[in-house]
Amino acid sequence: MTMSYLSTHACDADDALRPCEYGGIRTSHINLLAVVTSIIAWACAAVSFFSNGEALILCPAVTEGCIFAAIPLVTAIGWVKPAVWSMFVTHCMSALYFGVLLGPVANVQSLTIFLLGSVFILFKNRNERIFGVSLTLLILGALEICYQYELFTPLHLPSFKEGMLRWLILFSVVALNCTVLYIYIRENLRYSNKLESLVRERTRKLEQATHSMGIFVSRVTHEIRSPLNIISGIVQNYADQPHLPNGHVKVEDSHLMAMNGCCQDVVGIINDVLDWSRIEAGQFEQVAENSFDLVSWANLQIAKYRHLGQMKRINLHLQMGANIPAQVISDQKKLSRILGNLLSNAIKFSFPCSVISVKLTIDGGLLEISVADQGAGIPADKLESIFSPYMSESNDLINGTGLGLPITRHITQLLGGSIRVESEPGYGSLFTVRVPITAALLPQPQPHDTTIPAVIKPFEGINVLVVDDNNLNQMAAGLHLKRLKMNALFASTAAEAMKIAQDQKPDLILSDLQMPHVNGMQLLSALRQNDETRHIPFIAVSGISYIEAQHEVMQSGADGFITKPIIFATLYQELEQVLRSAKVAQIAS
């Protein structure tokens, strides 16, 4: 095995045993520096032997050459760091030895560029470079002190041999400096090429991301405009019709159902975009486990989407395993999101007059939810890409925002589970989710859901102050309150709300948080600081759905929180809970 072979092919070995780089420099360059130095050392030893036979020059030079010749062997077995340090220390000790032995004739100072260049080539760590530069300067300084104060007597050589030695040293210095310069240029070129390649790659990814984001924005815009177009068309149709004598307009049930469905679609799209932005920011809410009836929960989810399926004449069939416990512990809200996304997807891509089969089983502490549709299916090369957001290619199988499945996989992984898909083009798809679940020993209170209660108890005689700077939002809230037989008072600003609260003492305040000048949080603070209004229950209304924002509002003294758009069932449950708590507090006081 020759030195040139080791120098050239050191990077061809297995990376685990023979690393091709150390501190950013290729081991082939380390080997090249060692090989050149060993050749120069042996050449000096040969010339010295044939010219004067001085053992004090011959033996150290041969030893130095052998050490440098061993460097490629050491780097070849993966001991790169010991090899680098051995080479550098040998350089320094050789300079010190021959500088003392030969005196000023050695002209060691001319090796300064080579020694300092070796430091910055071999070492990338700051502390190592400081040590290397310090050691080099210390040796050069020590030699100058030796020369000035004649601490050592240099080896005496005849003038002819001294002249020959000077030429040999000059040749060696030039060769070593050229080697360092060559390696420096090659490393800089390699670094520049690597940097250019990295810039090109990142530019390509940025262009791809920009293109994908453009498609995503276009897709979201289209998906929002579609339901808005339906709502706008229906509303314009009735706006252009003559009104009844009492000013009312008779609206067909199918039109109301269509507008309600479109509103839910828009809300779903916005929720998907907001959720994915939080996922990308690493701020998605943590798992909140609770106990609930899995069978009732599954039936409720199917009931929510059954109407959506009937619009396409699609039947939903639910099958529950035989070993389902009465109560389970998991994050009910996130499981609802998972099943809801899968059902929405299945309905969207299933053929009319088909069946969607939903099956829930529990095996080995894992809840398995499978949703099988009878749609067009998904090609094998698309099975993984359907879980990727901001898809950069057009795909007829994946419309909508394209975020439903990525969010579903993220939630599934957040719960410690997994999701897989099986599909055959022309025969439909099967999505299977497996998440850990625990059987509950005792039933616990179930969280609120957004379904309308079977029996709605009106709150007659309850005065509610609605605070919102938007008159249409006031009207929408007023319709909900009127349905509950509650008396609505309205205020457009925080100052107006504060005056009404002090003068009329409403039973409850329903306030928007985003208002000009004085916002809802500032209004809440003012109400709590006033002795006349501090007892009035306060429900905050906001378009911000982040759980952190809800916690902040509740910690500031609010009694409840509702996210826009206001869903009647959610409002009813929040009112019932807040008013019940206020009544209990009043009795206790």
Image (cartoon, helix red, strand yellow):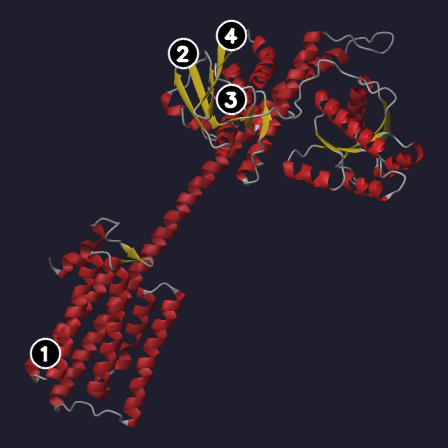
Q: Is residue 84 above or below residue 361?
A: below
- Discs 3/2, front: 2
Task: Tell me the tag on residue 47.
Answer: 1
- Discs 2/1, front: 2
Earlier residue among tags 3 and 2: 3
**In the picture provided, is 194 more to the left or to the right than 38?**
right
- Residue 251 visible within the image: yes
**In the picture provided, is 376 more to the left or to the right than 260?**
left
Q: How crowded is mark 4: few (under 14 residues within 10 Å), some or many (20 or more)?
A: some
Compute the Cα span from label 4 to label 3. 17 Å
Q: In percent of the image, x 18 and y 69: which residue is there? A: 67
Earlier residue among tags 4 and 1: 1
Indicate the position of residue 10 as horizontal and vertical percent values.
20, 55
Q: Mark 2 points at which residue?
A: 427
Q: Quadrant of the C terminus?
A: top right
Q: Mark 4 points at which residue?
A: 352
